[in-house]
Amino acid sequence: MWLRNPLITGTSVVGITFDNGVVIAADLLGSYGSMAQLRMLPRIFKINDCTVLGGSGDYADFQFLHEVIKEKV
């Protein structure tokens, strides 16, 4: 049977807009189940001068999406 639960997860990505731009921030913690194991796991990547990718949840999905977007750029 396939494992259906994400292995490395994380949360806390926030974006705020204001008159002159946008601020996006995220924590760096990655959890394996209920254990906080990875403490320097980036959740925000610059795609180009106008686009930033931020994601929470399963880190493998985020990495895959990031790689696909990098290839397209």
Image (tube, helix red, strand yellow):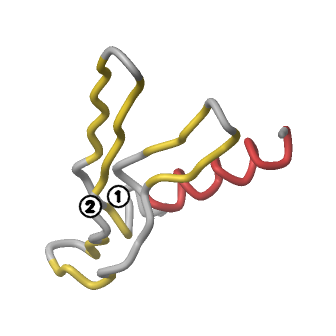
> Residue at 45% across / 60% down in the picture?
59
The location of residue 63, given as percent across then percent down, is 59, 58
The location of residue 46, given as percent across then percent down, is 60, 48
Considering only vertical position in the picture, is 48 above or below 38? above
Considering only vertical position in the picture, is 30 above or below 15? below
Q: Is residue 12 left or right of residue 47?
A: left
Quarter of the picture containing the C terminus is top right
First in sequence: mark 1 or mark 2? Answer: 1
Query: Which amino acid, by three-letter code, is at mark 2?
Result: Asp
Query: Which amino acid, by three-letter code, is at mark 1?
Result: Asn
Please rate how many residues cluster around mark 2, counting C-alpha atoms within 10 Å: few if below 14, some from 14 to 19, many from 20.
some
The residue tagged 2 is: 27
Furthest toward the left, the residue is: 34
> Residue at 67% across / 37% down in the picture?
49
Q: How far apart are marks 1 and 2 (CA)?
A: 21 Å
Furthest toward the right, the residue is: 72
> Residue at 55% across / 52% down in the picture?
45
Most foreground residue, 66 or 16: 16
Q: What element carries label 2?
A: loop
Considering only vertical position in the picture, is 38 above or below 24? below
The answer to which quarter of the image holds residue 39 is bottom left
Q: In this view, does 52 lie to the left or right of 27?
A: right
The location of residue 60, given as percent across then percent down, is 53, 61
Please rate how many residues cluster around mark 1, counting C-alpha atoms within 10 Å: few if below 14, some from 14 to 19, many from 20.
few
Most foreground residue, 62 or 5: 62
The location of residue 72, given as percent across then percent down, is 85, 39
Furthest toward the front, the residue is: 20
> Residue at 26% across / 39% down in the picture?
14
Furthest toward the top, the residue is: 19
Q: Is mark 1 on a helix, strand or loop?
A: loop
The residue tagged 1 is: 5
